[in-house]
Image (cartoon, rainbow, N blue to C red):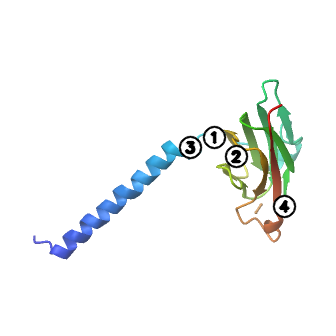
Amino acid sequence: MRVELYERIWLWIGSAMIVFFLAIIVSSSAMHAVHPPSHVETIDPGTVLSDSEFSHPRIETHADGSVEVIGTAEMYVFKPGTIRVRRGKPVTFRLTSADVVHGFQIVGTNANATLLPGYISQFTLAFPNAGEFLIVCNEYCGLSHHLMQARLVVEEAP
Ligand code: CUA
């Protein structure tokens, strides 16, 4: 079987593009801490608001400055609405949805999670820069999706 020169050229270009895209995925996961979800923990979305853990969204600051955030997303509000953490200290988020799919993106940081009903999204991050950051829902969740926001305040460690 004879393969035309142009076909061979395009086969090589196509193969090179696949290798190039795979290299981008591997290098971004290694260098920019972009991780696929690795925490699988389920919860009945119908009981989130009466759940012993998630019925009281809160921020727990430990003696070493690390913080645990227990939060929920529902149409169209994040709880807690303001999250205060210390700069450079690890922050563990435990988040879930009480109704539909919501997003949880902290603009200007690499915190970006999808909150699926039935699952608890957990991730730990430290924020290297002090300041105020907008938290937005980046999954369309209904008519007031665009109003769904919260804020993260990163304070200088005392
Ligand atoms: Cu919640 Cu969009």
Residue 140 visible? The answer is yes
Q: Nearer the viewer, residue 52 or 113?
A: 113
Q: Find disc 3 in the rendering and name its residue.
A: 33
Q: Position of residue 64 (x, y in %)?
A: 78, 24
Q: Find disc 2 in the rendering and name its residue.
A: 119
Q: Find disc 4 in the rendering and name its residue.
A: 76
Q: Find disc 1 in the rendering and name its residue.
A: 40
Q: Marks 2 and 3: in contact by CB < 8 Å?
A: no
Q: Secondary structure at mark 2?
A: loop
Q: CA distance from mark 1 to mark 2?
A: 7 Å
Q: Marks 2 and 1: in contact by CB < 8 Å?
A: yes
Q: CA distance from mark 2 to mark 4?
A: 18 Å
Amino acid bearing label 1: Val
Q: Is mark 4 within 8 Å of ligand 1?
A: yes
Residue 126 occupies which quadrant of the picture? top right
Amino acid bearing label 3: Ala
Figure check: 63 above or below 32: above
Amino acid bearing label 2: Tyr
Q: In this view, which residue lies farthest toward the left? A: 1
Q: Secondary structure at mark 3?
A: loop
Residue 44 visible? The answer is no
